[in-house]
Amino acid sequence: MATPDVNVLAEIREICMDFTSPLEIFREAIQNSYDANAKRIWIAVEEQEIEGSKRVNITIEDDGDGIYKDKIHCFFDLGHSTKSDPKTGKKLSDTVGYKGHGTKIFYNSEGIILDTWYDSKYVKVEMNNPRAKLFSGEIPKYTDPTEVSKEDKNYLPKTHGEHGTRITIIGYQPNVTNPTAHLSHVTIKDHIQWFTRHGSVEPIL
């Protein structure tokens, strides 16, 4: 008997292309923050000019539980999740995201930096040029989780709490023209209020 095979490169690339609006970044990130029991979320979008060209950098940080070192692969992998049973694929708790698809929207970028802290540990993981590699026929790789010293002043999180996660998306390249038009303060705020878990009325029903 034969076992069905999966073209991982093609699947990740197709999922990346399925995300057509850069605003979907905030939906996915906020959903993950809520699933991690975050009480506060910080969002920053900046336009950076490098050698005459502009790129968009996005940072989302929360004071959630953090991502344990042995679970970080779930953030980057396809189909793996800390929120589902690895055998059945069913959700383990009352969470929204559990399929491991949403974070693939972050792959539409020049780089991803994942910082997470918990139990007095600070861990950093990086992925370079995921979009370019996907479209050149290569599966992007990420660095091994590296513990960062608390004394590293470049690392200080906004939360200054005992746990949390920060995602930095460098040079986001959405599947639309003129991405900055979609990323104004007013547009982002409106999207968060109407189309993300943060604006959901479910908690009061």
Image (cartoon, rainbow, N blue to C red):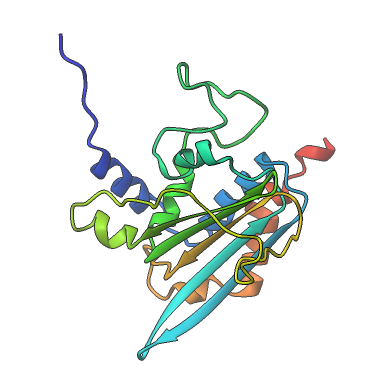
Q: How many marks?
A: 0
Where residue 140 appears, x then y in whole percent? Answer: 30, 52
- In the displayed structure, 165 sits above or below 69; it is below
Residue placed at 21% from the left, 26% from the top? 5
Seen at 58% across and 40% down, the residue is 68
Q: Nearer the viewer, residue 27 or 137?
A: 137
Q: 110 and 17: which one is in front?
A: 110
Query: Which is nearer the eye, 97 or 153?
Result: 153
The spot of residue 10 in percent (x, y) is 24, 43
| Quarter of the figure with residue 11 | top left
Horizontal side of 156 relative to 45 (left or right) equals right
Percent of width and height locating residue 69? 54, 41
- Image check: 111 left or right of 182? left
Residue found at x 62% / y 70%: 44
| Lateral position of residue 199 relative to residue 166, left or right | right
Q: Quadrant of the C terminus?
A: top right
- Outermost residue to the right: 204
- In the rendered image, the vertical position of residue 77 relative to residue 105, given as above or below: above
Q: Quadrant of residue 55?
A: bottom left
Q: Quadrant of the N terminus?
A: top left
> Farthest residue in the top direction?
1
Outermost residue to the bottom: 52
Image coordinates for residue 194, horizontal then vertical, percent: 67, 54
Q: Residue at x 37, y 66 (%)?
A: 110
